[in-house]
Amino acid sequence: MATTSSGTITSVTSNGTSRITGLSSGIDVDSLVEQLMSAEQYKLNRLKQQQQLATWRQEQYREMTTSVTAFADKYLNTLSSSSMLSQSTYTQFAATSSSSAVTVKAGATATAATHTIEVSQLATAATLASSGGITANIQGSTAADFTAAQGSSFVLTVDGTSRTVTLGADAQDVEDLQEAVDTAVGADKVTVSVDDEGLLIFSAAADSGVQQITLAAPSSGGSALTALGFSSSDSLTNRLSTTDTLETVAAKLGTAFSFNDEGQLSFTMNDIAFTFDMDDTLAEMISEINSSDAGVTMKYDSLSDQLSLTATETGAGATLVASEDGGTFLAAVLNQATAGTDAKLTLDGQSLTRSANTLTVDGVTYTLNSVTTEAATIGVTRDTDAIYDAINNFITDYNSLIDLINTKISEDYDSDYPPLTAAQEAEMSESEIEKWNEQATTGLLHSDSMLQNMLSSLRETMLTVVAGQSATFYTIGITTGTYDEKGKLHIDEDKLKAALESNPGEVMDLFCQQSTSYSGTTTVRSLTSSERAVRYKEEGIAYRFYDVLQDYIGTTRDLSGNKGLLLEKAGMENDASNTDNILTDQLNDLAARIEAEEERLEAKETQYYNKYTYMETYISTLTAQLAVFSSDSSSS
């Protein structure tokens, strides 16, 4: 906005339009126009309030859609583990074993029974492994000079515990060194010896239980290692590191392996070829083999100092076939082959052989953990508690869902709390605005006929007899509460569990019997009303629930081309209805009307200013003329 002044006239430029708002007339034009426009603002405010109400209403409908969809996904989806449409929910069994040698799990196709099982042999995987520790003992590269080492020290780490070994001022030979080592780490743990060339060797003492030994220079003071014949290129540990290159690994082994003519390791495992360079690390080799399709697992065990290759499949047969091209890695390192074995067992008197330690017979899955010393007894019983819990969870969540919906449609709307205008919000604090909006959004779905009809339809599903079934919700212990509970269900635990014990099939069919005429879950949206009536009569209560809720949240279009009623009304995110629904159309219409009204108000404001501009200009001109006449009269 630009402002210029000349005499008693002030010119204001706003949005490209020049307006004269000076005080020639003595009138505050801006305040007057503002007051006039405030009266004109009423229609725009009403439109924006309608827009806000429609937005809030859409949000609340979508909240209902989300809650109903979550309930349906959990209990009315055949892929859900808690689906009330699946027979497996009502045919759960508990299995027990008298021995930890065999663990069991009963599936939906199991039957109540008692079994006996004996295990004489477990299935094992074929392996290629080192026959013993593969890393060489720690050995110096030059003869030890004990005189030069006198008074100096080194760090000796035994299985993670580090101690400083200090040679005495009179140390003369390996016996003196051994004494210093025993003093530092304890006797009979690490043996120090010397070979024919005078090279020192550090090794684990026989039957000591010691695994890893490492030498290192002390953090301060003179190091004895150089005088004892160890150079920086010598290996100072009797274990491999997976970060070692394959070239380093070969040098560290007691029996070194060789690379092929290209300086590589090249071998095939179960028809999968592998090639590794000298500078590849042991970790890289292990990772590539284990992530391949060779069906084998390579591992370096630092405790036993052994490298192994194990077939991922257990059982006898060609599960691990390996060959090498040119090098000697397999022959030198993986030189002990153990064939896989099959599991051997006797189940209910029948001898069986399996390649794995897990087998399923007549719905019962047996896991073999160890050989048995005597026959294990397996008991399979119907898991009434688990079935009861599944039904109880369904009823509990159903009650929560209808309670949420009943609360929304029972809230009273207070018209004294319309959406706030921008001017009203400017005069209020954030907490005041929050409290106002909380009241303004209450009751927007009061007595909503669509939600009321959905609840009514759900209640009706439980009252109509399921074709061919004598059981009802009432006979199995499920009843409705008092009138003021608005359709909530209650379970008589003893009665329901008794029904599950005596007539489990009837309870299952009451819930998940499928229509013989129109079965499944994918057909309901494409049926005519007469076909729906046949399906409804023939199917169990859970399927009726599914059908009713699909009428409201179904994303598949029916014969009329419509999606579920809630989606048609308010839409749903991540669906075409998100922008194609009644409330969105209403909001788009309101947005267009608001834009038109804002343009009208802008034109109206300009009109007012133009009128006062003409007046100000006329008065200013008249004032100037009077001044001239007055001047002429004075001079004459």
Image: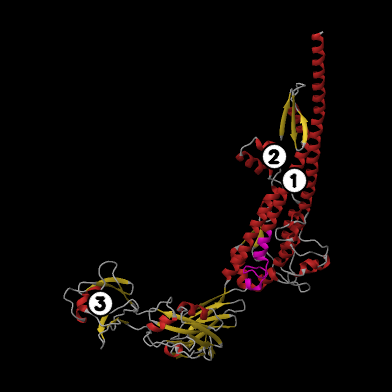
Q: Is residue 536 above or below residue 583?
A: below
Query: Which label sits in the foreground, 3 or 1?
Result: 3
Q: Is residue 80 magenta?
A: yes
The stretch of residues the image draws in magenta is 68-90
Q: Amino acid at mark 1?
A: Gln
Residue drawn at x 78%, y 40% is 598
Q: Amino acid at mark 2?
A: Leu
Per the image, the residue denoted by label 2 is 420
Q: Which mark is residue 227?
A: 3
Element marked by disc 2: loop
Q: How far from the left and from the top, in percent, is residue 529?
A: 82, 65
Mark 3 or mark 1: name the one nearer the start of the chain: 1
Q: Quadrant of residue 462?
A: bottom right
Q: Which mark is residue 51?
A: 1
10 Å neighbourhood of mark 2: few (<14), some, or many (≥20)?
A: some
Going by the image, does 472 lie left or right of 148? right
Residue drawn at x 69%, y 36% is 423
Nearest the camera: 347 or 608? Answer: 608
Which residue sits furthest top?
A: 636
Q: Which mark is residue 383?
A: none
